[in-house]
Image (cartoon, rainbow, N blue to C red):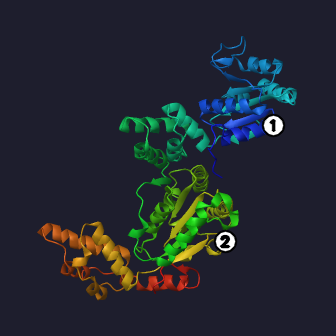
Amino acid sequence: MEQTTNSPAAESRAAKILREAFESGRPLTYVRTSEERRAGRVLREVGLRLFAPTPVPVWTWSLTSGMHRDGQAAEVGTHDPRGALDFIAAHPHPAIFHLMDFHEPLRESAGIRRCLRDIYESCRGQRKFVVITSPVRSIPEEIERSLLFLELRPPDLVELVAFLREESGDSSHPLLLQLAPALLGLTLDEARYALRRALAATGKLGPESLPALLEEKRLLINRSGVLEYIADGTNIGEVGGLDGLKAWLLERRKLFELRDSLNSEIVPKGLLLMGIPGCGKSLAVKAIAAYFQLPLYRVDMIEIFSGRHGKPEGAFVEACKLMEDLVPAVLWFDEIEMGITSANAGDEQGRIFAFFLTWMQEKARGLFVAATANRIDLLPAEMIRKGRFDEVFFVDLPSDEERLEIFKIHLSRRGVDAADINLDQLTEFTQGWSGAEVEQCVVSAVTKARLTDTHVTGVDLIQAAVKIVPLSRTMEQQINHIRGWAFERAVRASRRR
């Protein structure tokens, strides 16, 4: 669930998790993170809240700096790991001890492992808490049951607002709340680079900084190769036809906006768009994100199974986990049938399928999933049954009225006044066309007009149309199969049929 940031004293998600772990009395915690600086910052926040109003001091240790408090010299004899543990054992007061990269001494020394087990016993009930941070998980078997393992997820809105306030020196709360969501999913170091890029581009922090922040975020998110940030939104008015889908989205948008106050059963989870290639499924997903006023992220199932990002199962799970840190957002699973085609739990696709079904039920309610599929007969029956997605829509070839609407959209987008053209005469030349074929017809006519330095006419469109052989003719059998399969399995995205 999203964090609230109505108060400067709001507690971050990371601080809350650690505070609750300490309040349960756990003396040992292992946090996997590459953000040492941020981990220390979170621990200091926990120290201020843990036994308020008395703050709990935070001691920090590293092999190079020894055991010390902020701004103070290291305690004598604490540079080596054993000396640090002896200091913790002898310390008489409540404290939080932050041990950085302590996994190395644990792995290499049986004596250190034994000493840490002794620390576990001696610190219980003494309000002394040891936190090991490391970018890798390396926990010896001897102490695995004695500590709590956590992963430090990317900062939430509470942390990002505080970060923006400190970095920019701007205390304008509405502005910070406007900019902070653009940094969700980034580490604080990455957010710092994005902020500096924005300041370099605009000279000051303001609404005009948002495009620069989003561009930096796009570059950082896209580096994974599996998850892509889609920056170019599409107005829902630019989608021709699909009136049934649009009406459904209008109703669900209201529920989605009220998601924090509604029962989770009625909060929209997502939809599946399946149907004939070239009929606007991808365009519709982009329009959904713009209509919901949410960022759009795309998971490429073909790229996941390419092997370039490790085992497909791990790449898929990591992509889903990352999206949990980017809410609220729309997540687009493109060509989902390319990765989830089996319900056999014994193979990798079966395990991905099982994880996906569970994740769909348990994911954050601020995440709306939009999946698209072309080869719909490959999808397991368990995926398309009611309850997995809120609705399964079938996108068919556009009707006569819808094709004319699509013609108008594409002509207008290219600066051509459709009022000067008799589009009705195109109906007989475009039977069985997809939206993509309508667009190609317009592009061909506009190209010819530009080459001859003339205006686009209805004759140009007709001449371009007669040269196009539609997919419905070259793949008639396959399209009829798709239609027959979807007839009783999906709701039509278009009402006019």
Q: Provide residue 474's location: percent of width, then percent of height.
A: 36, 82
Q: Nearer the viewer, residue 243 or 269?
A: 243
Query: In the picture provided, is 301 more to the left or to the right than 103?
Result: left
Amino acid at the residue labelled 1: Glu
Gap in angstroms between the C-alphas marked 1 and 2: 38 Å
For the point 54% across and 82% down, the residue is 486
Tag of residue 387: 2
Q: Provide residue 229's location: percent of width, then percent of height.
A: 47, 53
Please determine whether, in this image, residue 126 is positioned above or below residue 464: above
Q: Provide residue 420's location: percent of width, then percent of height.
A: 21, 78
Estimate how packed mark 2 is, as few (under 14), some (14 to 19) or many (20 or more) residues with alpha carbons within 10 Å.
few
Q: Secondary structure at mark 1?
A: helix
Nearest to N terminus: mark 1 or mark 2 = 1
For the point 66% across and 52% down, the residue is 1
Query: In the picture provided, is 186 more to the left or to the right than 386?
Result: left
Q: Provide residue 194's location: percent of width, then percent of height.
A: 45, 39
Q: Which residue matches tag 1?
A: 23
Please determine whether, in this image, residue 236 is positioned above or below residue 171: below
Residue 139 visible in image: no
Q: Nearer the viewer, residue 83 or 12?
A: 12
